Image (cartoon, helix red, strand yellow):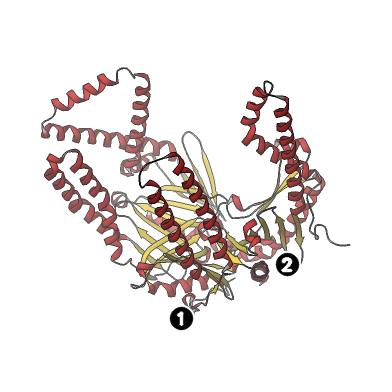
Amino acid sequence: MNVTFTNAPVDLDSLPDYQEIAYTKVSVKRLYKVLCIQGFLLILALIGLFLLREVTDVPYLIPGLGAGILLLFLLLMAYQYKLQGTLGYALRERDIAYRRGFIFEKITIIPFNRIQHISTSASALDRIFKISNLNIFTAGGSGSDIDIPGLTPELAARLKDKVANHIIDENDA
Amino acid sequence: MPKAFSQPQTQSKLGIVFIFLGQSVKFVRIFGAAGIYFILKGFEAEARLVTIALSILFGVLLLLLGFSYVSFQRFRFHIDYVNREFILQKGVFNTEVISLPFSKIQQVYFKRSLLQRLIGVYSVILDTAGSSAQEINIKALSESEARDLQKILMEEVAAEKQEETTVLESTQEQNSREDAVAVHKLSVISLLKLGLTSNYFRGVWLILIFLGSIYQQAGDFQLIEESQYQEGIRGYLEAYSKPVELLVLTALVFVGVFLLGILISSIEIFIKYFDLTLRQTKDSLELEMGLKTNTKISLKPRRVQLMRIVTNPVQKRLNLNEAQIAIASSRDDLQKSQISIPGMQRMQLERVKKFLFTYRMRPGRVFKPAFILYIRLIITAGIPLLLTAIVGSIVVPNYMVEIGLVLVIIYGGLVLPYQFFWYRALSLEITPEFVIKRKGVWTQKTEILELYKLQSVTVSQPFWYKSRGLYNYTFHTAGGDVSFPVTTSKMQRYINYALYRVEIDKKAWM
């Protein structure tokens, strides 16, 4: 085990830089799915508003609320649109990186030899849109786990196998 | 002959019954109240309504049965002997495929709930080092299947572990040249010293909670006297309305509470850490303590994920340091899996560190947060004061000048310097083998983690830091996270190094 422990100085500049990783974007179907949910909620809210109109007669309440709701949903949709562009993952030889967030850009990097287990999951809606999620778990609590959404099922399964094989390789070495 | 469990298979047929009953119980829990209401009312209602209700109930039961059947059919598990992992597929609406490598399985055990006993099935649980939500639970296996599965998995896991143990033993040998000796013993005098110098706020806080509950109790009993009581307070306030008297009185109360706080803290420490001894054996540290309940803990270097050393200026003078050690746990609540060893001298501390850590400490590069953090700190600390001022200006507009003055004094005299010292004390050192974070003005904390025990790294950046090139860094370990705010992008090279350090490492991290 002392083979790995040498005192030779490591040249920091020669190490692969995680900032230079090219990220693969997730499928735009994820955005469609989220917009679909938001559209549905918007319709529900508008129906609620319509019913509210029958029972109150406070002046300007309905137009005000309506404008507020529309603005809120527009903002939410714009946020999701911007967020979509930032979602990306990258596989390197020895680790996997996941980038997300538009207001807070966050990059989590998990070395393959620290992965506990992997799963792919898909909700009913995900299956309608033909996408699925890749979930990678470590022992470091929820903060260090990653969930990559919006992958085609084939890709998710392939990524899962690839990462799983890496875990095996690490252990055999 | 194919190996057992190598083909995807369902649970025992009884599983359908188990799922169905489980779902029915859930259903009854949700709609039970409505059902009871209907039964009570139902007899008075028309016969037609009763038949409708009964047919609805029947329909729901049929749906549940169908759901249970699909759920049972979809829940399939098998062992992939080639890739050496356990694979589980499940879910009716939300589907999930989980693969769990043999090497990551910590335990395989059985569990039975009352319902499972009634039906005669077993839960087989595969436990990993992650949080409890991540374990795999196969809920309905017959006894023979459960035993077979456990046996096969345990054999495979053991085979996997065998390869690793050779590596492990050499680490331990290296660490345990010294023989079993008492490293640290806490005498009564040290206990007293500790009590007198520890954090009193905890004691004060306990008093406040105690008083709060008493006040509530009293309030419950003496509802009638409340108006009288308020009258009393008003009279009291009038009697002491002169500012000087009020000030002296408040000061006295504060001193009293403070002294009581010290007393309570001391007693708590005395009970908790009475007769604490730390012994070092060949491959672990044995900790024993407690007056009321005797706690015994065995600490293996391999399990240690994160170490925190806590002290304050007075304790530093007396050479008292508290070591808090977080070990790898399968719980989300990391606070609970933390072990505290108070009252250690620096020499003993060094010894414990030397024993628990695989590598020697060498100096590294020290990072400080950017100055903008101080600005952010004083702005957030100013918000409560600003709110007080706003509330004050509404409630007592006449005293605006006085209130403003007091607030400005508090802010300029306490908040600004405190936050400045806090900001200045914050630093992160990355050495070839360690990450060391230092923080705290009065209570000084040093968090140490070995690089090779890292689980993952998160780097985050709000968009308003983009132009400045500042980032927040979080190091995740199985014993908790260490995060460091607003630092230059220069740290990124060290993140690359940390990842490299983890990825080249072949040692078991727990």
**On screen, A149 above or below B273?**
below
Q: Position of residue B311 (x, y in %)?
A: 35, 51
Kind of residue sitting beneath label 1:
Asp
Q: Position of residue B4 (x, y in %)?
A: 82, 57
Does residue B501 appear in the picture of this structure? yes
Instruction: Tell me the residue at 32%/17% (across/down).
Output: B224
Does residue B274 appear in the picture of this structure? no
For this orientation, the residue located farthest to the top is B224
- The answer to which of B460 and B510 lies nearer the viewer is B460
Q: Secondary structure at mark 2?
A: loop
- The answer to which of B464 and B345 lies nearer the viewer is B464
Instruction: Tell me the residue at 52%/66% (across/down).
Output: B452
Q: Position of residue B7 (x, y in %)?
A: 81, 60
Query: In which chain is the residue bearing label 2?
Result: B
Query: In which chain is the residue bearing label 1?
Result: A
Residue that badge 1 annotates: A11
Residue that badge 2 annotates: B83
Q: Which image quadrant: the N terminus of chain B?
A: bottom right
Please give left or right for residue A17 compared with residue B426 in the image. right
Q: Which image quadrant: the C terminus of chain B?
A: bottom right
Disc 1 crowd, CA 10 A, few/some/many (<14, 14-19, 20+): few
Q: Same chain for marks 2 and 1?
A: no
Kind of residue sitting beneath label 2:
Asn
Q: Secondary structure at mark 1?
A: loop
Res B366 → quadrant = bottom left
Disc 2 crowd, CA 10 A, few/some/many (<14, 14-19, 20+): some
